[in-house]
Amino acid sequence: MPRPRHEGMSGKDPMPSQAPDWKRHVSELLQLIASEDGQLAYERDVPYVDIRVELLCMWFDDTYHPDDGLFAACFTADERSALARFHAFYAERRRGLPDSEGTVRTWLASPVWREIMKEASATLEMIRPQSSESLGGAP
């Protein structure tokens, strides 16, 4: 999964003309963290990076920016709360993750990583748009 890019950036203009779609970026990253198949595919498709570093960096450095107004505006108060809980959960457990030994399979064998994956999945369910059926719309 590529890192979020500010669309509309020119080489001369340091300000984006259009804000990134933070909800989509967060959802895609939570999906990756929650998915064994997704992680294995990412590792296969991007073999030149240490996926352990990448999965940490993508969340803690690139994606989760709760104090940014544009980021916060993309989520409801309940969604922001769910993201904050996931962030704290992930942050508490990341030191307990084993060295990747060059493969995500090391993490996939770790109960700590499996807990993080499960929490990512639960958080993703809390920020996904509800279907029209669950909103009382036509099926």
Image (spheres, helix red, strand yellow):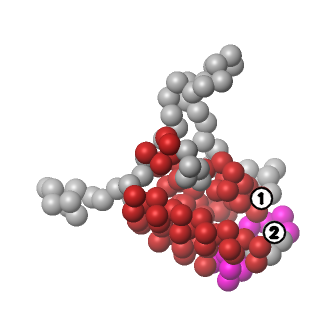
Q: Position of residue 78 (x, y in %)?
A: 39, 62
Please name whichever residue, 45 or 1, is drawn nearer the observer in this view of the structure: 1
Which secondary structure, mark 2? loop
| Residue 43 appears in the picture as rendered | no
Q: Position of residue 63 (x, y in %)?
A: 60, 50
**Dot placed on the residue nearer the N-terminal end, 2 or 1:** 1
In the image, which residues are magenta?
101-114
The label on residue 53 is 1
Residue type, mark 1 in image? Val
Q: Who's the residue at 47% across and 66% down the image?
A: 82
Please name whichever residue, 83 or 137, is drawn nearer the observer in this view of the structure: 83
Q: Who's the residue at 43% across and 45% down the image?
A: 73
Residue topped by disc 2: 100
**Quadrant of image for the C terminus:** bottom left
In this view, 73 is above or below 139: above
| Residue 95 appears in the picture as rendered | yes
In the image: residue 56, left or right of residue 38: right
Task: Tell me if label 2 and label 1 are in contact, CB under 8 Å.
Answer: yes
Residue found at the very far bottom of the displayed protein:
111
Q: How many marks?
A: 2
Q: Position of residue 3 (x, y in %)?
A: 64, 44
Q: Who's the residue at 77% across and 58% down the image?
A: 53
User: In the picture, residue 133 is in which quadrant?
Assistant: bottom left
Q: Nearer the viewer, mark 2 or mark 1?
A: 1
Magenta highlight on residue 107: yes
User: In the picture, residue 106 is in which quadrant?
Assistant: bottom right
Please name whichever residue, 75 or 30, is drawn nearer the observer in this view of the structure: 75
Q: Who's the residue at 76% across and 77% down the image?
A: 96
Residue type, mark 2 in image? Ser
In the image: residue 26, left or right of residue 98: left
